[in-house]
Amino acid sequence: MNTANNKRRKETLETIKKTFVELIQNQELDQISISQLCKKAGINRTTFYACYDGLHDIADSIRKDLEDNMVEMYRDEIENRKSRNDYLKLFRHIKDNQIFYRTYFKLGYDTQLKGFGYDAKAAAKYFDNKFIQYHSEFFRAGITRIIRMWLENGCEESPEDMMEIIRSEYKGRLAQDGEK
């Protein structure tokens, strides 16, 4: 294995992603050209196409990176079947990675977070196991909109304040830290 080439390829992939993220902040996806991205990244089109099939491929790669990062962040909770209601962890991650979350939302991937963080077992208990899919969708839409608004406001409130908003909306129905 050629370690130097692997390192160079990783650096090129990251440069392309970083440049794409910069461009998408001020333009829509369909307004960005591969030529524009290559020029800004300081690479040629051949290099670009050796790494990605197109702009949608980069967008998908960024989505996958962020979703993998979120899964890793909640790995312990997932593996041990603990409640994933530790939204403080999520809000801290968002505050530390605002540009990537803004990109994620701008690309419209937020609709793919169907069951993220929703504790169906707790919901079944609180709602007598009725209409869980509707409660789940209501929660997902609400948390998504709150996160979007927070990002639009530059994450002015602290992650702790955002967690308090969630707790107050759900009036103690969220499992406390460490509870199953």
Image: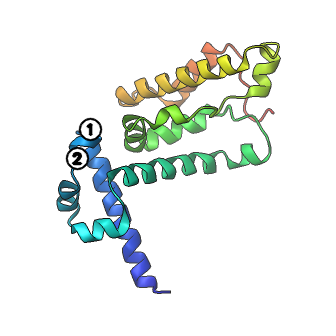
In-image side of 16 versus 89 (left or right): left
CB of mark 1 within 8 Å of CB of mark 2?
A: yes
Quarter holding the C terminus? top right
In-image side of 132 versus 149 (left or right): right
Estimate how packed mark 2 is, as few (under 14), some (14 to 19) or many (20 or more) residues with alpha carbons within 10 Å: some
- Residue at mark 1: 28
130 w.r.t. 80: above or below: above
Estimate how packed mark 1 is, as few (under 14), some (14 to 19) or many (20 or more) residues with alpha carbons within 10 Å: few
**Residue flagged by tag 1: what amino acid is it?**
Glu
Q: Residue 152's spot in the image, x, y percent?
A: 35, 27
At x 73%, y 15%, the residue is: 131
In the rendered image, the residue lying farthest to the front is 53
The image shows a total of numbered marks equal to 2
The secondary element bearing badge 1 is classed as loop
Instruction: Tell me how far mark 1 sits from mark 2, CA to CA.
Output: 7 Å
The answer to which image quadrant residue 17 occupies is: bottom left
The answer to which image quadrant residue 170 occupies is: top right
Label at residue 32:
2
